[in-house]
Image (cartoon, coloured by chain):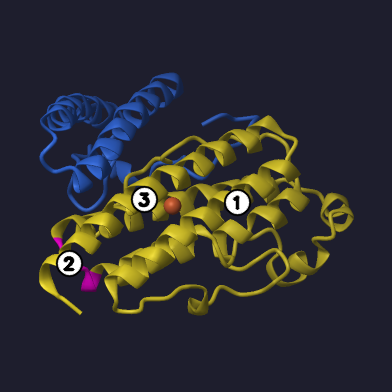
Amino acid sequence: MWLYEKKLQYPVRIKKPNPQMAMYILSQFGGPDGELAASLRYLSQRHHMPIPEAKAMLNDIGTEELAHFEMIGAMVHQLMKNASLEQIKAAGAGTWYTDHDRATWPGTGTGVPFTASYIMSKGDPIADLYEDLAAEQKARATYEHLIDLADDPDVIDPLRWLREREVVHFQRFGEILMKLQEHRDRKHVF
Amino acid sequence: MTGLRESLLNQIRAVEFATLELNLFLNSHPDNQHALRDYNNHVRQLMALKNEYERNFGPLINFGFGYSRCPWQWINDPWPWEYDSGRGY
Ligand SMILES: [Fe+2]
């Protein structure tokens, strides 16, 4: 069961429309290393975790990623909402406008739809945790690329905050990987 | 009213960030008594702030986790993704 808390985890208050930046940021909404992929990856993998620490961590980080998905959606929405057609055309977002007007949609800014093939749930807890560690690093790198592309402080501030969360998640997953290895070594001798 | 709402939400964000961080930390360090004490202290603060928000603005959390006055306050604008620089929150 999930409940909705009527607030963003961290504020998003973008004053200046910028359709080009919206197209870039969409990758963290429905792209390969985005927040939706992160959430679905952890919430799928949690079912086969063998130890309480791992179940809790995947459950809770999977939940936090949904709050990040929400922040990214808010960023895209605020960057597109008041954009003029001239701005949209100049930003090369005319193809987006054709299919979506100024709507938010889980896919990249180049129109590639979200797909479950971005994620894996292998059924092997250690293999899955290695994927999760890599995923957090890729998400961190994506945020760094977005920060390089951004020039508006209203955009950079939440991006930096989200980048920092990937660093924390990486740390927590690293601790879980060690516990899973200890658990494996206690249980099986190959 | 807008000022009070935003100020309460900011305080809730700050305290809830601490409880979330401590929650994740405790998931991998369940025996850490210092972190656990810290977590429980922040929970108390978070509950008090959440109650104050709800007394003024209605439910912060849906599906029965907050009281509402009439008319039903949950549907009140603005929603979290809405920000209009001209209007503020
Ligand atoms: Fe993450």
Chain shown in yellow: A
The amino acid pointed to by label 2 is Asp
Can you identify the residue that label 1 sits on?
A141
Q: For the point 22% across and 29% down, which residue is it?
A: B46
Give the alpha-carbon distance from disc 2 to disc 3, as whole Å: 30 Å
Q: Is residue B6 above or below residue B63?
A: above
Specify start and end residues of the magenta stretch as a single range: A47-51
Residue A28 percent location from the top left of the image: 57, 57
Question: Is residue A67 toward the left or the right of residue A18 in the image?
Answer: left
The amino acid pointed to by label 3 is Glu
Can you identify the residue that label 3 sits on?
A64
Residue A150 percent location from the top left of the image: 73, 41
Can you identify the residue that label 2 sits on?
A185
Q: Chain of mark 3?
A: A
Mark 2 crowdedness (10 Å alpha carbons): few <14, some 14-19, many ≥20: few
Residue A81 appears in the rendering: no
- Answer whether labels 2 and 3 touch (C-beta < 8 Å): no
- Answer whether labels 3 and 1 touch (C-beta < 8 Å): no
Which one is in front in this view, the residue at disc 2 or the one at disc 1?
2
Q: Colour of chain B?
A: blue
Q: Is residue A133 above or below residue B24?
A: below
Residue A79 percent location from the top left of the image: 68, 46
Q: Secondary structure at mark 2?
A: helix
Which one is in front in this view, the residue at disc 3 or the one at disc 1?
1
Residue A102 in the magenta stretch? The answer is no
Beta carbon of the mark 3 residue lies under 8 A of ligand 1: yes
The amino acid pointed to by label 1 is Ala
Q: Nearer the viewer, residue A47 or B69?
A: A47
Q: For the point 75% across and 36% down, which residue is it?
A: A151
